[in-house]
Amino acid sequence: MKPKVRLYVEQPLGAAQQVPLTREQAHYLFAVMRLGPGAQVALFNGRDGQWAAEVVEAGKRGGTLRCVDATAPQVLPPDLWLVFAPIKKARTDFIVEKAVEMGVRRIVPVQTAFTNSERIRQDRLQAHAVEAAEQCGATFVPEVADLLRLDQLLADWPEGRQLMFCDETRAGRSSVLTDGLAAAPWAVLIGPEGGFSDAERARLAGLDLAHPVALGPRILRADTAAVAALTLWQITLGDWT
Amino acid sequence: MKPKVRLYVEQPLGAAQQVPLTREQAHYLFAVMRLGPGAQVALFNGRDGQWAAEVVEAGKRGGTLRCVDATAPQVLPPDLWLVFAPIKKARTDFIVEKAVEMGVRRIVPVQTAFTNSERIRQDRLQAHAVEAAEQCGATFVPEVADLLRLDQLLADWPEGRQLMFCDETRAGRSSVLTDGLAAAPWAVLIGPEGGFSDAERARLAGLDLAHPVALGPRILRADTAAVAALTLWQITLGDWT
């Protein structure tokens, strides 16, 4: 029977490996999900694939699982970053969740000239990424980076990483994605809802690796644009083929 | 100067046309947005394109605008329906918003075997569609249909309307979309998060016009799947080219 619960843990997973639970995990498994000794749980840790594990000990403040069988191999998403300007809390949470489901390797929140978000709760966003991975069946959890300024990110842009950027106020072609850059590392940059500043535009225009892409005739909110742009990338260059 | 406010109204729009405001519209324009006589507002009604209008009279319980110039032509989105099973309230609202931004002609909530939603607030969802259209620059507002049962919808499926369906538990090819069906009316059906029932699957399999499509190796939530599927459709057959 397929386990009903899928849980991310930090411990190593392997044949007969014991996995001690934190208080929160024990509460979730035994109080919320009402599992008891012998029940099966699917585990992943972002490195060792997915394992079926069985509850060995169930307590109020902790417990132990034991790995039984490897049930899915470790799968990395493509080497794709999602770079975006955080907006209102709920939509930022959504963007992180969507990035995990869509399959990215790293989530990079940036502050742009027209973003008023000066800080993010990196730990909260990372926890969201974990939850999304538990939910969507992925064996990998993308790292959520700390907020940094877009101009700094672009000034130190990694050599060879292609950048697809979506600027609502500017035309672009989606065909750039078929230019034979499938093997390269990539990033998708979602413009802030207020658009890029002139200085940001100039910097992007000066970046050889940057490819403007259009996302249709209507203005998309940032969370919609993130899913649309990642779809475009995944069906052309990613793991949706 | 570009008007900062974009408002959907029901009245006809045309040169020198006067547009009386409802109490809610007056409150929004004059109390919330603090506009006064002479201020410009962009108007659309889903039929007559977009007009720049000017505030003629601003009152607490009403007011009047007058159309000045036509600023954008009326544009219909492609003849595409989004059919989906309503889920939790916030995600249903998101799906309606996203459908408008992505460009569909009609939004059709359906009840499936594994959906527990027995009713929707059609008026609330329609108001969401209006807000999304105001926000995304569209001149058209898709109609949100009343909730009906998926098996009934499929039993009366309109002749010639192609159906792209996304079933998380079943494989599909995205290449069906290049089969030269660009001129046909279409619908995109997003499966419920619990999947389709066997009976629903059998009915879909029996429908000549139905095309299963895969959305990558991870399980997408319904709202993510809606945006991804609409992106796939729009870049292949729609108005994103």
Image (cartoon, coloured by chain):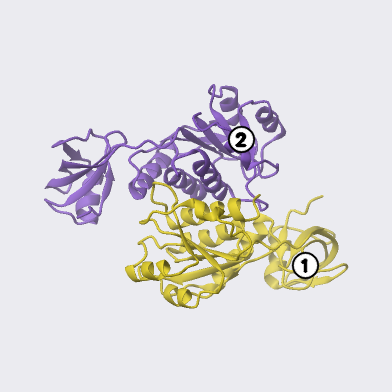
Chain colours: A purple, B yellow
Which one is nearer the viewer's eye here, B113 or B135? B113
Residue A202 position by quadrant: top right
Could one spot residue B116 in this view of the protein?
A: no
- In the image: residue B61, left or right of residue A108: right
Q: Which residue is the site of mark 1?
A: B48
Give the mark toward the camera: 2 or 1.
Answer: 1
Query: Residue A100, which numbered label?
Result: none
Three-letter code, disc 2? Thr
Three-letter code, disc 1? Asp
- In the image: residue A135, left or right of residue B63: left
Residue B55 position by quadrant: bottom right
Crowding at mark 2 (Cα within 10 Å: few <14, some 14-19, many 20+): many
Give the structural element (helix, strand or loop) at label 1: loop
On the image, the x and y values in percent for residue A184 come to: 51, 28
Could one spot residue B137 in this view of the protein?
A: yes
Mark 2–mark 1 contact, CB under 8 Å? Answer: no
**Residue at image point 49% right, 34% down:** A81
On the image, the x and y values in percent for residue B220 come to: 42, 52
Quarter that holds the N terminus of chain A: bottom left
Give the structural element (helix, strand or loop) at label 2: loop
On the image, the x and y values in percent for residue B221 come to: 42, 54
Residue B41 position by quadrant: bottom right
Quarter that holds the C terminus of chain A: top left
Q: Which residue is the site of mark 2?
A: A112
Above or below, A79 relative to B118? above
Q: Chain of mark 1?
A: B
In whole angstroms, how far apart are the C-alphas of marks 2 and 1?
Answer: 37 Å
Which one is nearer the viewer's eye here, B156 or A133? B156
